Amino acid sequence: MIKPQEALRIILESVPKLSPVPIPLAEIDGYVLAEDIVAAHDVPPFDNSAMDGYALLAADIAGAGKDTPVTLKLIEEQPAGKSTDAVVTPGTAIKIMTGAPIPAGADVVVPIERTRSAGDTVEILAALPVKNNIRAAGEDMPKGSTAATAGAVVTPVVVGLLASLGFPAASACAKPRVAVIGTGNELIPVDQPLTPGKIRDSNSYTVTAQARGCGAIVARLGVAGDTKEDVARLVNAALADADVVVTSGGVSVGDYDFVKDVLAEMGAELKFWGVKQKPGKPLAFWTLEEKLIFGLPGNPVATVLCFEEYVRPALLKMMGRTNLLRPVVTAGLTHDLRKKPGRQHFIGVRVEAADGRYKATVNGRQGSGILKSLAGADGIAIVPEDVTEMKAGEELQVQLIGLPEDH
Ligand code: AMP
Ligand code: MG
């Protein structure tokens, strides 16, 4: 059995790079750019007015004030979206709207609130310096500048920059296609009545939701019965389309745990089976050509935690992210805790921040079948392999699973 850090290292090392694909702008948020975005023109493309008001010559209004208005002749109106050949000369002004190009000759815009309209003339009631209320061409992004670099996650703001620069699409790292498979004769679909000995399949739903939460494209293929044939049928179906296959259950040492046998027969390369952790000891991981296959243990808490700890970082890396891991903080336990040595424990906790320190409280009754122990948990506490006992106030590392990755 290997340690959790070693398991993560092996997985991340096996992650293939997906080829970049052109993604239309309306769908590109959340993708990682595969190219630098360089401005082919200035944004804004021309000097324009920041206010509704009058474009004129600053020199003309040097002495203007409330009691000393300067009267200028109106020669034109300049709405947004229109350009004009009219030229502002001394003694004249052009009425201008926000976003309209600054007419030739003008070097300042006086906002309408500081003027008084008078038919075909206007009275200016304030002196303003040159360039006031003028947005210079290229002040947002000058031509030739880099608006976003390859490797950046496309945020809504980056989408806006791409639009301003005239990119209908951009090259981004593809999102992995993930196929989700449950295994187990005891599992019945969520819409069927319970019968003796049966439980409902929940793992295929938690895994689907978790994979989608990473931004992956997910197909839930359903549940295979505990026969080699049925497991092989679904795994083959999964491999036909997916970059990543995630199974749950059937990877332990039970008589009906066939996932390992099936993958061995398919020629998948077993990278590891068994991690010194609780829950999730029987976690298995294979590669087959460029594809990744995760065999998550079936206990619902183990499934969720193994996804969070191992599958999530792999999917993020596949889609080009460089921050793969959630923020980790040091937190003081609010109570005593005991465990057996030999395995690292992952425990769902509630995290509170008080006076600049974090406090962690185990989130209710623990057990690999007690999925509720993770509902409302906003942290995963790491209790190291050799620790057997911790006292209230002692500190441990906690991953903040409610926050995005920061390293
Ligand atoms: P296994 O690893 O297949 O032995 O499963 C371990 C435990 O997890 C058993 O109690 C299973 O009933 C349970 N289990 C396996 N798969 C699922 C699933 N898809 N949904 C809910 N529980 C499951
Ligand atoms: Mg099973």
Image (cartoon, rainbow, N blue to C red):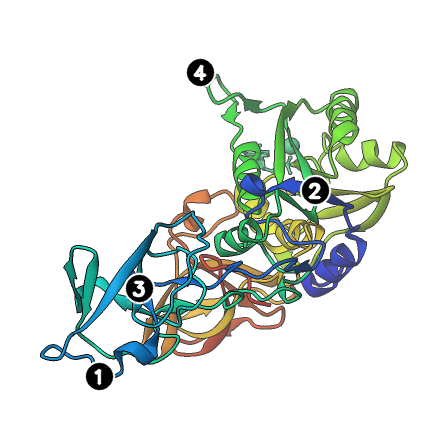
Mark 2–mark 4 CB contact (< 8 Å): no
Cα–Cα span, label 1 and label 4: 87 Å
Cα–Cα span, label 4 and label 3: 80 Å
The label on residue 93 is 3
Q: Which residue is mark 2?
A: 22
- In primary-sequence order, the first of circles 2 and 1 is 2
Indicate which quadrant contains ligand 1.
top right
Using a 10 Å C-alpha cutoff, classify the residue at mark 1 as few (fewer than 14 neighbours), some (14 to 19) or many (20 or more).
some
Q: Which residue is mark 1?
A: 63
Relative image position of residue 31 (x, y in whole percent): 61, 49
Using a 10 Å C-alpha cutoff, classify the residue at mark 2 as few (fewer than 14 neighbours), some (14 to 19) or many (20 or more).
some
Relative image position of residue 221 (x, y in whole percent): 64, 25
Left of 199 or right of it: where is 75?
Answer: left
Name the amino acid, label 2.
Pro
Question: Looking at the image, is mark 4 or mark 3 nearer the viewer?
Answer: 3
Q: Which residue is mark 4?
A: 193
Name the amino acid, label 4.
Pro
Cα–Cα span, label 2 and label 4: 46 Å
Residue drawn at 15 percent across, 75 percent down: 69
Mark 4–mark 3 CB contact (< 8 Å): no
